[in-house]
Image (cartoon, helix red, strand yellow):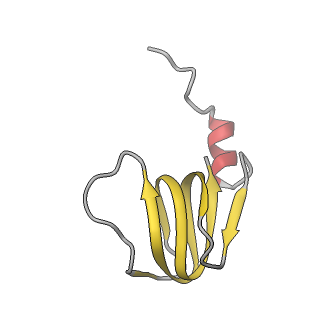
Amino acid sequence: MNLTNVFSSTDALLAMLGQHNGIVTISDSTQVNGKFFSIQIITDTVFAMLTESNHSGGTITGVTLKAGMIIYGEFLAIKLTSGIVRAYKA
């Protein structure tokens, strides 16, 4: 088994705390591209677009997500209708 892409426990902790590759705070409707593993909802937020890799099924665009929520996945593009989020870089 090849384990070259597995985080060490230290790297995993740093990533969870936003110290691995950084955090982007998004508070307007400008599209932000990158690779993010989680999104923290700071104020009630509506996504205009949320592009995920390895995802099938419905979308959460147009739905209000409440402040305090954290969503996980592999997000490639984020665009808000309203709200403020912090996106943690993968």
Q: Position of residue 68 (x, y in %)?
A: 54, 77
- For residue 65, above or below residue 18: below
Q: Position of residue 9 (x, y in %)?
A: 62, 36
- For residue 13, above or below residue 61: above
Q: Position of residue 3 (x, y in %)?
A: 52, 20
Q: Position of residue 31 (x, y in %)?
A: 59, 67
Residue at 25% over, 58% down: 57
Residue at 54% over, 76% down: 80
Residue sitting at the far front: 30
Relative horizontal placement of residue 67, taking residue 11 as reference (left or right): left
Residue sitting at the far left: 57
Q: Toward the viewer: 49 or 36?
A: 49
Residue at 65% over, 48% down: 15
- For residue 33, above or below residue 27: above
Relative horizontal placement of residue 78, taking residue 28 as reference (left or right): left
Residue at 63% over, 72% down: 30
Residue sitting at the far top: 1
Relative horizontal placement of residue 69, taking residue 13 as reference (left or right): left
The quadrant of the picture occupied by the N terminus is: top left
Number of numbered markers: 0
Q: Residue 5, located in which quarter of the rendered image?
A: top right
